[in-house]
Amino acid sequence: MAGQGQGLQSRNYQPSERLAPYVARHYIFNVDAPDQFELIDHLLSETPFVRLLLRGDWAAEAIKGIWSNVGKAVFFGANSRPMKVRVRGGFRVVGVAFCPAGWRALTDFPADAFTDRMVPLSDMMGRRAKTLLDDVTRIEDNTPDGDARIIAAIEAIICDLLEARGWPKADAAMQRFEILARNHSTALVRDVASELAMSERQLERRCRPTFGMSPKAVLRRSRFLDMATAMRGISNPDERELAALRYYDQPQLIREFRHFITMTPGQFRKQPTPLLDAGLALRNLRKMQDAANQAADA
């Protein structure tokens, strides 16, 4: 899948069937650019994810006004607000996004301990973080065959981690909530809770340690991402879907865009956001896969 921007190439892959309850997607970004090139963009991830920087100068504004980089192997929690990122020159990044429902199988840390944070991957994965970075760094083949070897190396580490933890099962109710939130972002929390056969309070208690935030915040972010995806032309919602996504009035629309992307809708239409767009495209692929799975189950 080609990305936008200065020579941005973005390729992404589904996880193996065994890891599908725990891993949302693998991705590889490459940018060939001169040393003086600088890109400032935003992350707004629905899932925790790992980023391995194999080449380039990369930093994030995890704390307003302070650019920092905690190393080449970084773990990010899900984002309730945008995290500004900066890259200079060309870069190569390998990443893996985790499924919220499978999060507690991977670690004892609740997801809300990492919301809007970036930390060294070793904080979450221990000694396996260095092994993972070393194994992936040795694979310099920038081809689909090289991608397959990178993914195999990543999945071997994740399987080793799950093996050590006894292969706990993903949270089935939160798997359903993830799909509902991604595909029905305008749903009310009370209706989602009813669909999942639990009270709103029970949903809240299950959601925070897996998604890192409240159900209402998850749905609010999902609705914004749906609108941003439609505005970028990445998805093609029909008139009924688009009408449901629209906000009550222009001030509310502006308020949501300022909250999630620090821009007005007009500014967003004009401002290139290649890294965010790549994330929106990945998310749209997952929605397409959801639809395919639903059709297969029908």
Image (cartoon, rainbow, N blue to C red):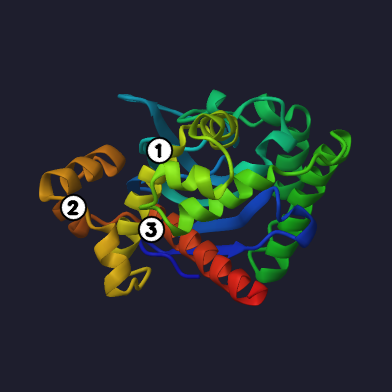
Q: Amino acid at mark 1?
A: Lys
Residues at marks 1 and 3, CA–CA distance in whole angstroms: 24 Å
Location of residue 192 in the rendering, given as x and y in whole percent from the top left corner:
48, 47
Of labels 3 and 2, earlier in sequence is 2
Residue picked out by circle 3 = 277
- Left or right: residue 221 compared with residue 249: right
Of residue 77 and residue 130, the one placed in the foreground of this image is 77
- Left or right: residue 227 compared with residue 47: left
Residues at marks 1 and 2, CA–CA distance in whole angstroms: 22 Å
Of labels 1 and 3, earlier in sequence is 1
Of residue 64 and residue 256, the one placed in the foreground of this image is 256
Identify the residue shown where x is 40% and y is 37%.
217
For the residues labelled 1 and 2, say whether their Cβ atoms are less than 8 Å apart.
no
Q: Determine which quarter of the picture holds residue 134.
A: top right
Q: Secondary structure at mark 2?
A: helix
Identify the residue shown where x is 72% and y is 49%.
136
Q: Secondary structure at mark 1?
A: helix
Q: Amino acid at mark 2?
A: Pro
Give the vertical position of 291 relative to 134 (above or below): below
Location of residue 278 in the rendering, given as x and y in whole percent from the top left corner:
44, 59
Q: Residue furthest left?
A: 250
Q: Using a 10 Å C-alpha cutoff, classify the residue at mark 3 as few (fewer than 14 neighbours), some (14 to 19) or many (20 or more).
A: many
Residue picked out by circle 2 = 265
Residues at marks 3 and 2, CA–CA distance in whole angstroms: 15 Å
Of labels 1 and 2, earlier in sequence is 1
Q: Secondary structure at mark 3?
A: helix
Q: Amino acid at mark 3?
A: Asp
Q: Determine which quarter of the picture holds residue 229.
A: bottom left
Location of residue 242 in the rendering, given as x and y in whole percent from the top left corner:
28, 66
Identify the residue shown where x is 32% and y is 54%.
273
Give the vertical position of 58 relative to 237 (above or below): above
Give me the disc on residue 216.
1
